Image (cartoon, rainbow, N blue to C red):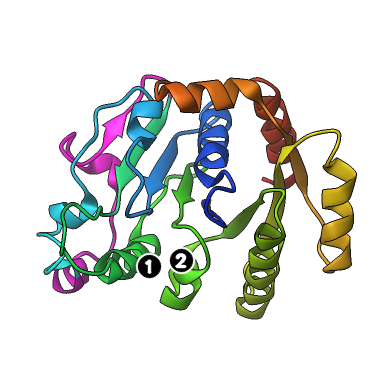
Amino acid sequence: MKLLVGGKGGAGKSAVSLLLAHELSKKANTILLDSDESNRLLPKTLGLETPDTIANYLGGRSKVRKSIEDHEKINLNELSSEYVSKTDYGITYAAVGKIEEYGEGCACPYGFLSKELLKRIELAPEEYLIVDAEAGIEHLGRGVEEGIDKLIVVIDPTAEGVEIAKKLVSEAQRIGKPIHLILNKVTSEIEQIMLEKLESEGLKADALIRYDPVIFKSSLMGGLFSAEKASEDISRFIETHL
């Protein structure tokens, strides 16, 4: 199953992607594909060395459009350790492409590559692919969702987070893709406010992830990702919806 995790910047997409990866890896091989061109610390949160990108595997940003056409199917698990890193507990990490230097140009080749990769990536039965998407809705314009099975939208306690979720729900329905909404960073003080805000926009959450100070601390320290309450919440979501 291919899952794309989207939402506004700062909503907690990477944290939810990591939560999903850790919980799903307990029952199946799981691939975490980083398609955010600016994210830097995702492999470190898994305790992994940072591999080279899939874009470079295909010859670099200037060649990805031509090179991807030579690959009808792609199995990320078969790539060398130069381009993928693997944990001891069943998570494979790979990155689509990264902006590396001043004046490099827009990230459009990486957006194109994300779309084409997702159509070509082969998964084994019961295997999961989790795509940590770039912030906002630009991936919609690039058609990245074409190759996924489900879209998971992370909403933080902001009006902008709800507005972006509303747009993503509308487009997911238009293109016929199942979508799940996850309220993130929920505290007892704001839970009802967030639920009422969603309801006022005609939306409904499929899961609530409680604010987890363990995640906050591990994110601040920049080391291995850790969670407590949030892991329990994502586990319930997986049992119900995946």
Query: Where is residue 90 shown, x and y percent of the image?
Result: 42, 27
Residue drawn at (88%, 66%) of the image: 200
Q: Could you give the CA–CA distance between mark 1 and mark 2, rounded to whole angstroms?
A: 7 Å
Would you say 216 lies left or right of 181 here?
left
- Callout 1 secondary element: helix
State the residue lying farthest toward the bottom: 174
Of the residues shown, which amino acid type is indicated by label 1? Lys
Q: Is residue 107 visible?
A: yes
Residue corresponding to mark 1: 115
Q: Establish if 124 lies above or below 158.
A: above
The crowding category of the residue bearing disc 2, from other C-alpha atoms within 10 Å (few below 14, some 14 to 19, many at least 20), is: some
Quadrant housing the C terminus = top right
Of the residues shown, which amino acid type is indicated by label 2? Gly
Query: Where is residue 185 shown, x and y percent of the image?
Result: 69, 38
Q: Give residue 172's mark.
A: none
Residue corresponding to mark 2: 147
Q: Is residue 226 visible?
A: no
The stretch of residues the image draws in magenta is: 65-89
| Residue 120 falls in image quadrant | bottom left
